[in-house]
Amino acid sequence: MNLARSAGLVFGKELRIELRTHDLTHTVLFFVLMVAGLFSFAFDPSSTESRVILPGLIWIAFFFAGTLMLQLCFVREQVNDTLAALRLAPIDPFAILLGKILANFGFLAVTEIVFVPVFSLFYNVSLGGVLGRLMLLLFLGTFGLAVPGTVFSAMTAQARMRELLLPLLLLPVLAPVLIAGVEATAALLGPGHALEREWVVMLAGFDLIFLTATWLLAGFLVEE
Amino acid sequence: MKPSGRAWQLTAIATAIVTALGGYAIFFVAPREETMGQIQRIFYFHAGTGICAYLGFFVSFLASIGYLASRQSEWDWMAVATAEVGLAFNTVVLVTGPIWAKPVWGIWWTWDARLTLDFILELLYIAYLLLRTMVAEPERRALVSGVFGIFAFLDVPLSYFSIRWWRTEHPQPVIGGGPGTGMAPMMWYVFLFTGIGLLALMAILSRERYRLEALRHEFAELAAGAEDEPEPVETKGLSR
């Protein structure tokens, strides 16, 4: 079975579980809504301040939501030891990870599509004209979150205190994504509304480098 | 990796002497820097430990690859030993840096490219060591920390470039002329001499940490063996 088809099947499985339980999407949607409010209480920004802090708020909110969500992606395979079944399947171990990476990316992307307009409303920053490019940046960054996030989730599924561990491993690794994402978003929302190419290259490069590393190391990650 | 006890002792003693002489040279041989004054002397220690820390992280990265490629525990021990000693050296860098920065820049800390990168490195390798404490089973621990060791090091160039672009886009905060651009010859000699001492110290500490890890491994094996030891059975020889 080729990689695309087997990864597609794993992706389909994740999607089906999610559509039946709504565990992840509901939790993450509520979390982001809550954070959008809490940031406003914490900083009480004026409209000029909003424009300055909004890029950081958006990225931090989705990063934290992502680390919250990613913990479940391998842990919920443990309840009925379904990971053993996945391992036994005659597919490339990378396909299992890729399917899960795509599913996690998908869940977060849906959250972003719902909540970027909400952030825009709450903080009075108009996104007309830049919305498409902003979503491109967010999707590139979210994929960068999903790749090492899924890998670390696989690594820590059997660890002690795994709920604490995942954010501690993931957030420092995501530093370049956060810097690139926030800077690019700030430039996009700024007076020039420019999409700065170097940050797009940085985000895409991060995705590519970590996806390649995952492909190379997948065999180690999925084994018993 | 078992040098005779005597050679080992001599290496340790030589390192202690070189380090002590280096300390003397920093204060009494190296010339006083013109603009920064005495505080510049911290540079010898600061930059030297910085190089050692980066070297430690790099060796740890190579050892992580070595473990995943060969599945020999020795590589894992080397990876943790160099990462831990590298982290200790990096902590020295992060402490001595602000001590120098306060009188020269007027502030303890700034999110300048190098400082930020060093800070991220500190976080990454604390995370690496935390991960190791949370996975009990030795082979699993070696495997996941090997993967994380590789991911963490891949992150270094990406962080470096994102921080450089981030900080060169904006005006820098007040930064005096950093050391390192055109040192007096005597400064170079002192720097090299203390550098040799620090590198030897790094090697010794890494080796001791490696031995500790090997001993722990041996202990765990013995303890497991003692548990599995079957009770002596009287019916020995009665085969069916």
Image (cartoon, grey):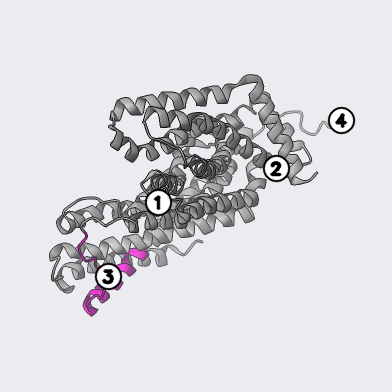
Instruction: Say whether residue B88 is magenta.
Output: no
| Disc nearest the viewer among 2 and 1 | 2
A98 sits to left or right of B178 = right
Q: Residues within 10 Å of mark 2 (few under 14, many from 20)?
A: many
Residue A122 visible, this angle: yes
Q: Which residue is mark 4?
A: B240
Name the secondary structure under disc 3: loop
CA neighbours of label 1 inside 10 A, class few (<14), some (14 to 19), many (20+):
many
In screen coordinates, is B217 left or right of B69? left
Circle on res. A130: none
* Mark 4 or mark 1: whose residue is earlier in sequence: 1
Q: Secondary structure at mark 1?
A: helix
The magenta stretch spans which residues?
B175-201
> In the image shown, does B161 or A57 lie closer to the viewer?
A57
Q: Which amino acid, by three-letter code, is at mark 3? A: Gly
Question: Pointer 3 indicates a residue of which chain?
Answer: B
Q: Tell me the CA gap for discs 3 and 2.
A: 49 Å
Residue at numbered disc 3: B180
- Quadrant the C terminus of chain B occupies: top right
Q: To which residue does mark 2 refer?
A: A95
Say whether disc 4 or disc 3 marks the residue closer to the N-terminus.
Answer: 3
Label 1 belongs to which residue? Answer: B121
